[in-house]
Amino acid sequence: MADKDETDTNYISDYLATLFPDMEEKFDPQIWAANWSKLLEHSHTTMKEMIETGQTNMDKASPQYQETADPFNLGTAFLSWTQNMMQNPETLIKTQTEYWQNMLNLWQQTAEQLMVSEDGNLGNPISIIEPEAGDRRFSDPSWNENAIFNLLKQSYLLTADWMHKTAETVEGVDDHDAQKIEFFTHQVTDAISPTNFWATNPTVLKETLETNGENLIRGFDNLVSDLDKETGKLKISMTDPDAFSVGENLATTEGKVVFENDLMQLIQYSPKTDSVFTKPLLIVPPWINKFYILDLGPKKSFIKYAVEQGHTVFIISWVNPDSSLRDKGFEDYMLQGPLAALDAIEKATGEKSINSIGYCIGGTLLSATLAYMAAKADNRIASATFFTTLTDFENAGELKVFIDEEQISNIEASMEENGYLDGSEMAMTFNMLRPNDLIWSFVINNYLMGKQPFPFDLLYWNSDSTRMPEKMHSYYLRNMYLENNLVKPNCLTLAGENIDLGKVKTPCFILSTKDDHIAPWQATYSIVNAFSGPVKFVLAGSGHIAGVINPPGEKEKYGYWSYDPRNKIEEPENWFSKSKQAAGSWWPEWQKWISRKAGKKVDARIPGAGKLKAIEDAPGRYVKTRL
């Protein structure tokens, strides 16, 4: 066995020396051989342990809880696609002919250049096809300068392009199946990129030469530490978990928990001004993630900004539910969330009328709450601001790929045992929307380069996922994404009241983001037409998170577009053509709007000084519960 391992190391070292002859002097054969043997020994031992552990867990597992072989229900979609493709072979023939012509051209040009090249480097890089704008995978100069790597890159891009065209051009396939096929074709092409493999990534190979293979040992150790020893599932580390602590360098805005029930804690923040607006401000964040996305740190905190503008800010901190809350539904989240918060805020401040903000699914809940309150003639919410919020789920973006009867039934079955959906499952779904940024870049950095992930507050928050109660999550998936009932008048009933968004007359500020993959702005724009009250629509640059967390200051990254539509049936594209672009943060634009609805100034309110006494310091216990 030792002789074979030694032969393997010689082949690999020769391969590296051929590709990068200028780095050969940094290569030490003895250290390389020792590191390679160590890596093989570690991998053999770990594989044996995983097989033994996996067999034990298989023996323990109940058949009814074993995962389905087709969790995304791809079989039916690809069967339909294949049948339609065979009935229309001309499309397949055309794309395949184009693909082979391009590949032949690529090989011919590469052969011609290699014949006149002495060292394998290309004077004029071959460019049959180029990566899309913003694709950072091929930034290493070797992808253009070295003939072998340029051939790999071009071959991959041509193959990926052929696969995408083949998936997209077959007619006669159901729209949902077509979307699913296109989405998972992208997953496959992203996965097979040569950047994701040790032997075909020049950056990784250079690091291997530079460190004599120590990067591979470090990477293997990183891989083993990310594997769950019980289940064998991989949870990729995206940031240094020891670099952040909620309440210490995240969620640090000063305040007190002044109310709590089994679904949420209500935080009231300490004032930063001597006087404040009369109307308090209630923020309803999503329960899929934790509220401190709005309070990442002093320089990025929307909460801190709102407090400094003179608002008495309250925010709901949702519980991270366990099995005991499995029967809590969407209606419970409304009653024990924003409606309970309204009663508590009145006790804390003496004010019945408030302004409100809903973020993502928190905004969906807020919109349903407004319709419920309209049915009861309850006018306590004077204005509503929505951050990247869907109320019409007809065109809800790539997340719709994961929604059909079969997939929801699979999710419900997975929730049945514990009474909740594990947060890691939802996190992986969101990561699949941007696999190169949120999956493969970390595979390369952590496991191939052998580096530790960079400390990044946003990615720490992203990995601090939460569970979803069984009843609530099933209701949300079925009534919003699958059946789109929220936008249908009187189709939903909550706490005995029919829900009709058209009865909502509350003035609204709608904030969407231009590159949002979770809540596409063309879909969120539908709120303009859903509500009957005055609406201001603002479109920020970037995506679902970065477009929202864009504070004013020296490092303003993204601008925004604004225009107040007079005609409510105006289409989003028409709105955009009339909008005006502004540089910098949209936060001051919101403050200008909300200040006209916030009332006069009164003396600043101290958390715990009213009828509601302080329970504990912000950010409270609920947000600190990790999976």
Image (cartoon, rainbow, N blue to C red):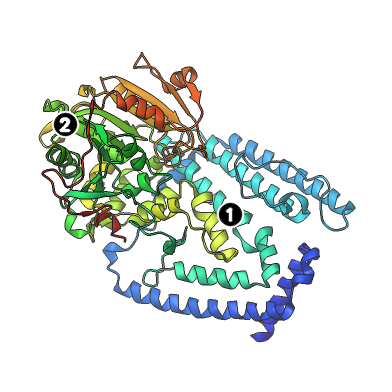
Q: Position of residue 276 (x, y in %)?
A: 26, 33
Q: Is residue 588 left or right of residue 310?
A: right
Furthest-bottom residue in this view: 2
Q: Looking at the picture, which amino acid does disc 1 mark? A: Ile
Which residue in the structure is indicated by mark 2?
372
Contact check, label 1 and label 2, Cβ < 8 Å = no
Q: Measuring from the top left, give residue 93's x and y in whole percent.
A: 63, 38
Residue nearest the observer in this picture, 482 or 91? 482
Q: Residue at x 34, y 38 (%)?
A: 308
The quadrant the C terminus occupies is bottom left
Q: Secondary structure at mark 2?
A: helix
Q: Dot 2: few (<14), some (14–19), or many (≥20) neighbours within 10 Å? A: many
**Element type at mark 1:** loop
Q: Position of residue 27 (x, y in %)?
A: 74, 72
Q: Nearer the viewer, residue 131 or 463?
A: 463
Q: Specify the quadrant of the image occupied by residue 215.
A: bottom right
Mark toward the start of the polypeptide (1 vs 2): 1
- 10 Å neighbourhood of mark 1: few (<14), some, or many (≥20)? few
Query: Which residue has dot 1 on it?
Result: 192
Residue 29 or residue 415, whichever sits in front? 29
Above or below 170: residue 320: below
**Relative to 48, residue 570 above or below:** above
Left or right? Give the position of 280 relative to 205. left
Residue 275: image quadrant is top left
Q: CA distance from mark 1 to mark 2?
A: 49 Å
Q: Position of residue 420 (x, y in %)?
A: 25, 55
Q: How many marks?
A: 2
Residue at 35% x, 29% y is: 591
Q: Residue at left 23%, top 37%?
A: 604
Type of amino acid under label 2: Tyr
